Amino acid sequence: MRKAIGAFATVAIFVLGINSSAAAFEGGGKKPSEAPTVAVGQHYTGQLNNHQNDANYGSSAEVAFWRLPPVSTRDVVTVDWHSVPSTRYPGEFPVCMTLVQGIDDFSWGSVFEHRDYCDNDGPVYELSGSGTAHTQITIQETSTNSTYLEFYAYANQTESDRYETYPYDFTVQPVLHYLGLAFQPVEKVSANGVVKATATLANGQPAPDGLTFGLTVTWRDGGVASYTATSSGGVVSFQLALPETAYNKNASFVVFHPAANDYQEVVAPKQTVRIATPVAPPPSACELAEGRALVLSRQYKRLRHNARHARGLSKRRLSHRARRAKRRLASARREVAGLCA
């Protein structure tokens, strides 16, 4: 359902004379400079009314301003808010809500003037028929102190028997920051290889280290495998360990980040990759050290054996080489002990 705001004045008249009935206004500020700053997760209440004498936008609407904490481009702000239906029109919820940026006490009316409709799709939101709303709004620009929630109601009644008061309440959930995610394209990967994705912020900088991402790999005949990895320098590396059923098949790779750790949910475009049979992993440092120690052990034994059977100058030379090989072997064995413990 869409509710027209009515014929607003061409140029906003921000504050008219307010009589004693203005006490019905509670919560928020009548203009941006009076707006209280909202704390994330805190529950707030307020109320508006439909009295024309209380309107702070021309003679058409009563508006309450609430200042949001600093936000950045493409952040998502989630507002849980509630109101009660009109007593005169029980199926209608008279309070509307919108988010605005870059306004002040002198400019807000000219911006508000163009908020023509209040509906479920925004950018000006009405409550759902259940009397509750869960509204997600994407921030358009970075702002440290000039982003506001506006709650408003039509205030054009002049007859006391038509006066109504509209309570509302709301909570702003933790702001979710934007993440960009791209799977680094490959045509073929070993079943025990590594695939990578890049994660960036809205400004193009690398995503923070330590964010957890997921990878789902699927192939025909019902094959599926899942992996997790954390970001480092904006790069996410997934170590694969695919079963034999995936060998030599085309598989779909989907990298994602769930909405968590103050960041939005994001899914990278699906990629199709050919799975190759596993490549033997390179030897570990321990294995390399053991190999060197084995070679030196054999060399030492051979030199010692030859020295025992030699005579004269040849014996002295072989004995010297055997002692040197023994020292190198001892050093290699210490290295093995350190690497293979």
Image (tube, rainbow, N blue to C red):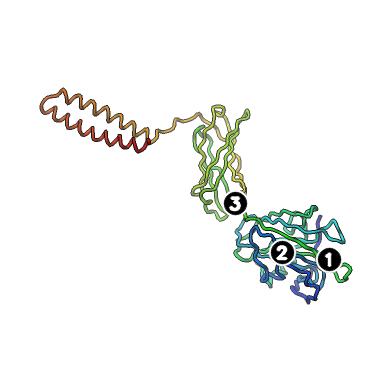
User: Where the N terminus falls, by quadrant?
Assistant: bottom right
Q: Position of residue 247 (x, y in %)?
A: 54, 28
Please state which of residues 328 and 126 is positioned toward the viewer in this rendering.
328
Q: In the drawing, does residue 178 fall left or right of residue 306?
A: right
The amino acid type found where label 2 is placed reads: Glu
In the picture shown, does residue 310 fall above or below 273? above
Q: Is residue 114 visible?
A: no
- Residue at (27%, 27%) from the top-left corner? 298
The residue located at (58%, 35%) in the rendering is 217
Residue bearing mark 2 = 150
Query: Could you say where residue 318 lies in the image, as x and y percent from the top left?
Result: 17, 29
Of helix, strand and loop, which one carries label 2? Answer: strand
Q: Secondary structure at mark 1?
A: loop
Give the Cα separation between the discs numbered 1 and 3: 41 Å
Question: Residue 146's image quarter?
Answer: bottom right
**Viewed as shown, does residue 87 lie left or right of 213?**
right
Q: What residue would you read off at disc 3?
A: 263
244, above or below 88, in the image? above
Q: Reading the chain from its start, which is encountered first: label 2 or label 1?
A: 2
**What residue is disc 1 on?**
164
